Image (cartoon, rainbow, N blue to C red):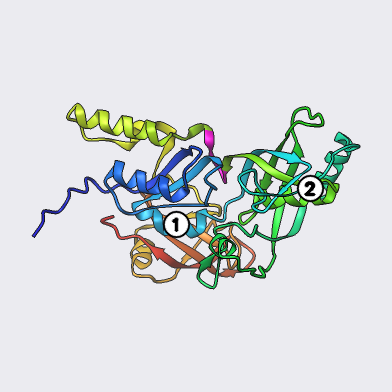
Amino acid sequence: MGRKRNQGPQRHGLLLVDKHEGCTSHDIVAQARRILRQKKIGHCGTLDPAATGLLLLTVGNATRLTRFLIRAPKIYEGSARLGVVTDTYDITGEVTAEQPVDGVTRDAIDETMASFLGVQEHRPPAYSAKKVGGKKLYELARAGEEVEVESKEVMIYDFRATGEWCEGEDLDFLLSCSSGTYARSMVYELGRALGTGATLSALRRTQIGSFQLDDATTIRQLKTRMDGCVEAGDEPHLADLGEAWIPFDDITLPFGGVQVDAQQEKRIRHGQTVLVRDLDSQEGDWIKIANQRREFIAVGSVVERIGTGKVGVIQPKVVFRAAD
């Protein structure tokens, strides 16, 4: 029987990574697993191989928070090439059409981009990781299968050109949007609205919810730091990464929170409802639950509001063991 590989200390929290070009989000997860010697790592929101920027990795118990964190709004900085259409909606695909951009003005671009603000019916590109019938769209597209993909509603908070633009140059833009929005599709629709066609030429994610790219580390920096600790005979500490590592108890979620007392904590640990005060959330909302020591113990939902004050009943849905 072979010897078990030492997995090292178990860590729980969020790791902010600046993804480099030319690799998938899954590649980054796999590398982080090797570096940290920890299998339980996931990510919140895929980035295409050609895209760079913020990738939020969930580590240990934080993997159970992925479904909440993935819903957070996102901000991108990118570039669009007007006059070109590709099958993937980005510059890595095959060109399917080219059109002149004569007569397109910056005013027309600004006006068109502003028309996308608010709730939009949005359709993912044919070449994307979205699954239909258990298969990813890009797998079906490569097999030559045409699949009708339902559109969904997304929210566009900001979509505007940045910097100067001249004909023959790529158009730099900023996109702030809800989860489920594809920047490639936004650029494609922009080109269609302008009558010129357009394809995404570069993309960098700068923010997910309250998490900022400026705080992130690269995989190379992570490996260098972890290897350096091992060579020095020290136990690697993710806290040394500064803002790039967020301990489990300090994780902010895209909804409100509440603090419970010792008796309520005992009920929460057993999956039982509790009556709480100082509740700002509404019935049906998710809520982060912490104990008196400010330890993150559960995610629950508000099942009832009582009266007109800040009193309500919460039901724990995801409970973390005290020993974790």
In this figure, which residue is indicated by the disc labeled 1? Answer: 65
Kind of residue at badge 1: Leu
Decide whether residue 211 is among the magenta residues: yes
Number of numbered discs on residues: 2
Crowd band around label 1 with a 10 angstrom C-alpha radius: few (<14), some (14–19), many (20+): some
Could you say which is closer to the camera, residue 251 or residue 99?
99
Report x, y in % for residue 129. Answer: 54, 58
Q: Residue at x 34, y 69 (%)?
A: 270
Relative vertical location of residue 115 with respect to residue 149 in this rendering, above or below: above
Tell which of 299 and 310 is nearer to you: 299
Q: Is residue 174 above or below residue 281?
A: above
- Mark 2 vs mark 1, CA separation in Å: 39 Å
Task: Work out whether residue 306 or residue 178 is closer to the camera in this orientation and state it.
Answer: 178
* Residue 52 placement (x, y as % from top left): 54, 39
Left or right of 138 on screen, residue 226: left
The disc placed on residue 197 is 2
Q: Residue at x 65, y 54 (%)?
A: 181
Residue 203: give x, y in percent of width and height.
Answer: 61, 40
Which of the 4 image quarters holds residue 130?
bottom right
Amino acid tagged 2: Gly
| For discs 2 and 1, the disc positioned in front in the rendered view | 2
The residue stretch that appears in magenta: 208-213
Residue 227's spot in the image, x, y percent?
26, 32
